[in-house]
Image (cartoon, rainbow, N blue to C red):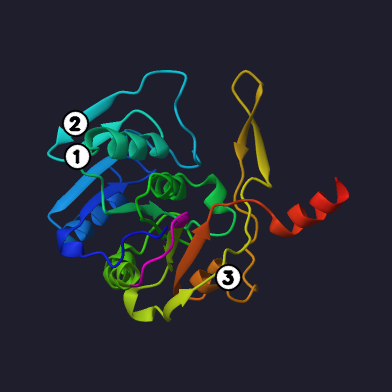
Amino acid sequence: MAFNFPIDLRRARILVSNDDGIEAPGLKLLVKLARSFSDDVWVCAPETEQSGASHSLTIARPLRIRKLGAKRYAVDGTPTDCVLLAVNGFMRERKPDLMFSGINAGGNMGEDVIYSGTVAAALEATLLGVPAIALSQYSASSQEYAWATAAHYLPRVVCRLVAQGWPRNTLINVNFPDVPPRKVKGISVTAQGRRKIGDNLVERLDPRGRPYYWIGPMRDEQRTRRGSDVKAVVNGHVSVTPVFFDLTSRRVLTRLRKALR
């Protein structure tokens, strides 16, 4: 069963969330852009940064939700908690027509989609029957972000996506390159590339001589794989990747069925 496309953005109820927290600049920009589409924009985001939270749910303690204003809420939980509480909680009488997650400060490409709270929020909406788009602004320095590029290209990407549509069980993952808008080379539809965080653990000693660890920087990105999100973004393209979350390896499934008869 497909989502109900095309979506008339002027009449759409839009939910916005993220993993950088309710006060993040990327969220504020995304809300502003969402309100340029529709007057019915709802925000539900974590109280604090939840980067790397992946698709985790808080089940060992109660969740607190704080109403900050009309259609604006903060939750002391994960991005997944936020979307679940919004869709099945205070928006249950009329669910969103569309969900945006981001705009993340930093790219979400390659294996990032497994760890990313930004992508997880979009995944939760997808699982709840709401079409969702994850949005991230890549930065080569991880200190300054080309927000103007996201602001310039997001409307045209979103308008084209909701006019075309995509099937259920699929979310759209968009990454904006770290270049000014005038230097963007185009919009590329890509496959998930390869890059992995956490290969380098950094060990330090605290003042008492006890070791502690930082999960180290990203290893070198795979910039050569043709058609990948990583290659597109580092080469100045906006990357649009359809992400399907059936993790079953069909090829191995067939082989194992024969082997384990």
Q: Secondary structure at mark 1?
A: strand
Q: Is residue 90 magenta?
A: no
Mark 2 and mark 1 in contact? Answer it, CB < 8 Å. yes
Q: Residue furthest front?
A: 261
Q: Which comes before the other along the chain, label 2 or label 1?
A: 2
The alpha-carbon separation of the residues under discs 1 and 3 comes to 36 Å
The alpha-carbon separation of the residues under discs 3 and 2 comes to 40 Å
Q: Amino acid at mark 3?
A: Ser
Mark 3 and mark 2 in contact? Answer it, CB < 8 Å. no
Q: Which residue is mark 2?
A: 67
First to last magenta residue range: 164-170
Residue at image position (46%, 69%) is: 239
Q: Give the image location of residue 7, x and y in percent.
A: 25, 64
Q: Which residue is mark 1?
A: 72
Q: Which comes before the other along the chain, label 1 or label 3?
A: 1
Q: Is residue 226 above or below residue 59?
A: below
Q: Which comes before the other along the chain, label 3 or label 2?
A: 2
Q: Amino acid at mark 1?
A: Arg
